[in-house]
Amino acid sequence: MPTSDPEDPPTDALVIIPTYNEADNIGQVIDLVLAQPLPISILVVDDNSTDGTPEVVRAKRDEAPDRIHLIERSGKLGLGTAYLRGFRYALAQGFTYICEMDADLSHDPDDLPRLIEPVRAGEVDLAIGSRYVQGVRVINWPLSRLVLSYSAGIYTRAITRLPILDVTAGFKCFHRRVLEALPLDRVNSDGYAFQVEMHYRTWRAGFRFKEIPVIFTERTEGESKMRREIVVEAALKVWELRLRDLMGRL
């Protein structure tokens, strides 16, 4: 499998940030991304927020029109389809390093260069910001949610044999070759299940990946998007992925 050219320009990076009612956070997130030593571009994919999120992004875009992009969708269509829309946009626009990040400051934008660098250097094709490599790195989660998340990882690895500790991690950097190779039109999951599916497909396609330790901090503004349906979907998705893989229909 080819490796990335270490001389590829670091400006060729885009971070995709899905939003739904994140007006309290998105402005600060954008400022922190723009302040990084690498001139990373931003794509916000908004799901018809009603709290003024798109207006905040548009105001920021006026300040840096070359680096801030906005896609506004007609309804609350889900995290998975938001990222897929962002992936297709990133590929069409020629970005090489394509990142995922939450809009609620649970992911520290200062970690973005640490995720991009090993991909840019050709060490890996996917760098994953991991809450569980080198110990548990989560702040302000109740014990019940931590146990649920950690147990989900054990459950997923037992069924799929996926060699990743943080199977539901949503902070990462892909090299474009991964997204070009994967059948994105077959990815139909959402929430945690979407992250599991992308990790599983990347692994089974033979791409190289690495978990980078990051600290995850629970949001302080806005409402969590965690729902029971998301957990159930993820629990079922791992069986679907494993069975489809065994049948050669992944």
Image (tube, grey):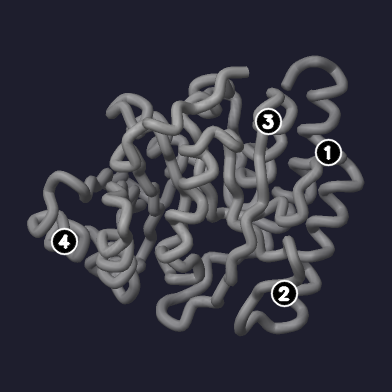
Amino acid found under the numbered disc labelled 1 = Trp
Give the labeled residue for mark 1: 239
Residue 184 position, x and y percent, is 53, 26
Q: Nearer the viewer, residue 162 or 26?
A: 162
Does label 2 or label 4 sit earlier along the sequence?
4
SS label for mark 4: helix
Determine crowd level at label 1: few under 14, some 14-19, many 20+ residues with C-alpha closer than 10 A.
some
Does label 4 or label 3 sit earlier along the sequence?
4
Amino acid found under the numbered disc labelled 4 = Lys
Closer to viewer: mark 3 or mark 2:
3
Q: Which mark is residue 201?
A: 3
Q: Is residue 17 left or right of residue 211?
A: left
* 3D distance between C-alphas at marks 1 and 2: 22 Å
Give the labeled residue for mark 2: 145
Instruction: Please report the residue visible at 61 percent of the width from the left and 84 percent of the height from the top.
Output: 140
Residue 163 position, x and y percent, is 80, 43
Does label 3 or label 2 sit earlier along the sequence?
2
Amino acid found under the numbered disc labelled 2 = Arg
Give the labeled residue for mark 4: 60
Residue 78 appears in the picture as rendered: no
Determine crowd level at label 3: few under 14, some 14-19, many 20+ residues with C-alpha closer than 10 A.
many
Residue 117 position, x and y percent, is 48, 46
Quarter of the C terminus within the rendering = top right
Instruction: Please report the residue visible at 65 percent of the width from the left and 80 percent of the height from the top.
Output: 141
Determine crowd level at label 4: few under 14, some 14-19, many 20+ residues with C-alpha closer than 10 A.
some
SS label for mark 3: helix
Count every numbered label the image shows and give the total: 4
Closer to viewer: mark 3 or mark 1:
3
Does label 1 or label 2 sit earlier along the sequence?
2
Instruction: Please report the residue visible at 39 percent of the width from the left and 53 percent of the height from the top.
Output: 17
User: Residue at the front extreme?
Assistant: 7
* 3D distance between C-alphas at marks 4 and 3: 35 Å
